[in-house]
Amino acid sequence: MKKLMIVMIALMSINLSMMAEPKIKFEKTTHNFGKFKKSEGPQTCAFNFTNTGDEDLVIYRAVAACGCTVPKFTKTPIKPGATGTISVEYNASRIQLGGHFKKSITVNTNGKPEMIRLFVEGDMEADVEE
């Protein structure tokens, strides 16, 4: 009977340790810059997140869909309960036309979810020439 109890406790602890995982939770996944002029220069924002899991969270990469959007992210592991930031710069000078835009940033992690998309959007207005 003792052996059976020991085996059951061992199996339960193995099962619980397999359930341990990092989890990423963002405060927001979309940022709207609103209206701005190209001459105002690059627009920046920050996506803050928390590791709500019980293992270290690692961001493997954060990649934008085009060269006008550049993400920078925390490269060190984020402990459970700790926070991190992905900062994004949208450089309108690389774009010829104005108007509405919506760009995506794909984030890959070792946690749940393994992949998440962040979005930046806004309306770039044409500069008035005098």
Image (spheres, grey):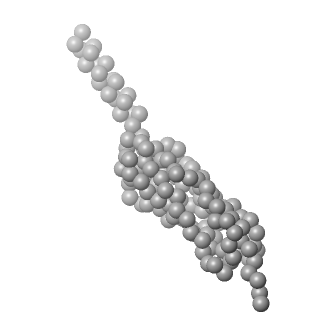
Q: Nearer the viewer, residue 48 or 13?
A: 48
Vertical side of 106 occupied by 112: above or below: above
Residue located 55% across and 48% down the image: 115
Vertical side of 115 occupied by 127: above or below: below
From the top left corner, tell me how far across and down residue 12 is, in percent: 34, 24
Question: Relative to 60, is 39 on the left or the right?
Answer: right
From the top left corner, tell me how far across and down residue 85 is, in percent: 47, 59
Question: Relative to 51, is 99 on the left or the right?
Answer: right
Q: Nearer the viewer, residue 3 or 27?
A: 27
Residue located 64% across and 61% down the image: 32
Residue located 43% across and 44% down the image: 52
Q: Does any portion of residue 87 appear in the rendered image?
A: yes
**Residue 89 figure quarter:** bottom right
**Residue 66 figure quarter:** bottom right
From the top left corner, tell me how far across and down residue 73 is, in percent: 47, 62
Q: Nearer the viewer, residue 8 or 41?
A: 41
Vertical side of 128 occupied by 56: above or below: above
From the top left corner, tell me how far across and down residue 16 is, in percent: 37, 30
The C terminus is located in which quarter? bottom right
Vertical side of 93 occupied by 7: above or below: above
Outermost residue on the left side: it is: 2
Q: Does any portion of residue 65 appear in the rendered image?
A: no
Residue located 48% across and 47% down the image: 24
The N terminus is located in which quarter? top left
